[in-house]
Image (cartoon, rainbow, N blue to C red):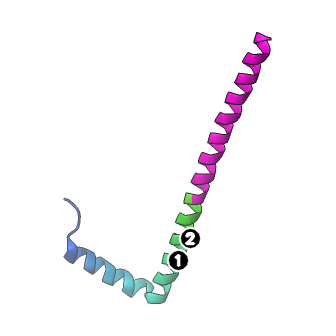
Amino acid sequence: MGMPGPFELIIILVIVLLIFGGKRLKNIGNEVGSAIKGFKSSMKDTDAEKKEDIIEAKVEADDESSDKKS
């Protein structure tokens, strides 16, 4: 049992269209798109915070090592 073929996908899409209707599908698409955008932006923010934390840790380590040398 593999991936459905093009004919099966068309049948599934027609059934979904009949169940939800065109307007509701558009709203669902918009909601899913905004959720994906929010997820991506939060992932970028998290990556930026991690990089900042790493840089701060390196600076603190350099400061401590220079204090010990003095």
Disc ID at residue 34: 2
Q: Residue at x 74, y 27 (%)?
A: 60
Q: Residue at x 59, y 59 (%)?
A: 41
Give the total of numbered labels.
Answer: 2
| Span of residues in magenta | 41-70
Instruction: Give percent across and percent down for residue 68.
Output: 77, 12
Please name the amino acid that badge 2 sits on. Answer: Ser
Q: Describe the element under mark 1 as helix, strand or loop.
A: helix
- Are the residues tagged 2 and 1 within 8 Å (C-beta)? yes
Displayed quadrant of residue 3: bottom left
Q: Quadrant of the N terminus?
A: bottom left
Q: Quadrant of the C terminus?
A: top right
Relative placement, left or right, of 18 versus 55 is left
Mark 2 neighbour class, 10 Å CA radius: few under 14, some 14 to 19, many 20 or more: few
Instruction: Give percent across and percent down for residue 44.
Output: 58, 53
Instruction: Give percent across and percent down for residue 61.
Output: 71, 23
Q: Is residue 55 above or below residue 21?
A: above
Q: Which residue is mark 1?
A: 30
Disc ID at residue 13: none
In this rendered view, identify the residue nearer to me: 67 or 27: 67
Instruction: Give percent across and percent down for residue 22.
Output: 44, 88
In magenta stretch: residue 20: no
